[in-house]
Amino acid sequence: MAKRLTEPDQWSNGDEPLGVQEIAELLGYKKTTVSSWRQRKQFPVPDHSVANNTVGLWKKSTVINWANATGRNKTGATL
């Protein structure tokens, strides 16, 4: 289950929420690749979810830190 963010300022400082499509574009992969990582549990748990927990959202920092740690930051994305 996704962690709940209760305060809007938890998304500040360049930590805009990203969905699967935005993550794919940010890291230089296809959307299906990011979805596969999620299904295989190779991707972090969403920082927040919407639409009755069916749509995950991640902080940009969560995604970039994970991508750097796993060698998947093809574009060299930074905060």
Image (cartoon, helix red, strand yellow):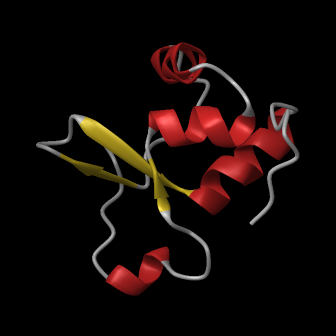
Q: At 52% from the left edge and 14% from the top edge, which residue is drawn?
A: 32
Image quadrant where residue 8 sits = bottom left
Residue visible at 81% across and 31% down in the picture: 72
Q: Closest to the observer: 25 or 38? A: 25
Query: Quadrant of the image for the C terminus?
Result: bottom right
In the displayed structure image, the side of residue 6 where residue 25 appears, left or right: right
**Where does the image place residue 69, in percent across and percent down from the top left?**
84, 42
Residue 29 is left or right of residue 70, and the answer is left
Residue drawn at x 48%, y 34% as measured from the top left: 21
Count of numbered badges drawn on the protein: 0
Tell me the quarter of the image containing the N terminus: top left
User: Where's residue 30, x and y in %?
Assistant: 61, 19
- Residue at coordinates 85% horizontally, 33% vertically from top-left? 74
Give the answer, above or below, for where 18 lies relative to 55.
below
The x, y position of residue 51, in whole percent, is 14, 44
Q: Left or right? Give the position of 30 relative to 3.
A: right
Q: Can residue 44 be seen in this view?
A: no
Task: Tell which residue pokes out farthest to the left in this image.
Answer: 52
Above or below for 28 versus 22: above
Could you tell me residue 47's position as x and y percent? 43, 55
Residue 30 visible in the picture: yes
Q: Compared with residue 39, is residue 17 higher up or lower down, i.e. above or below?
A: below
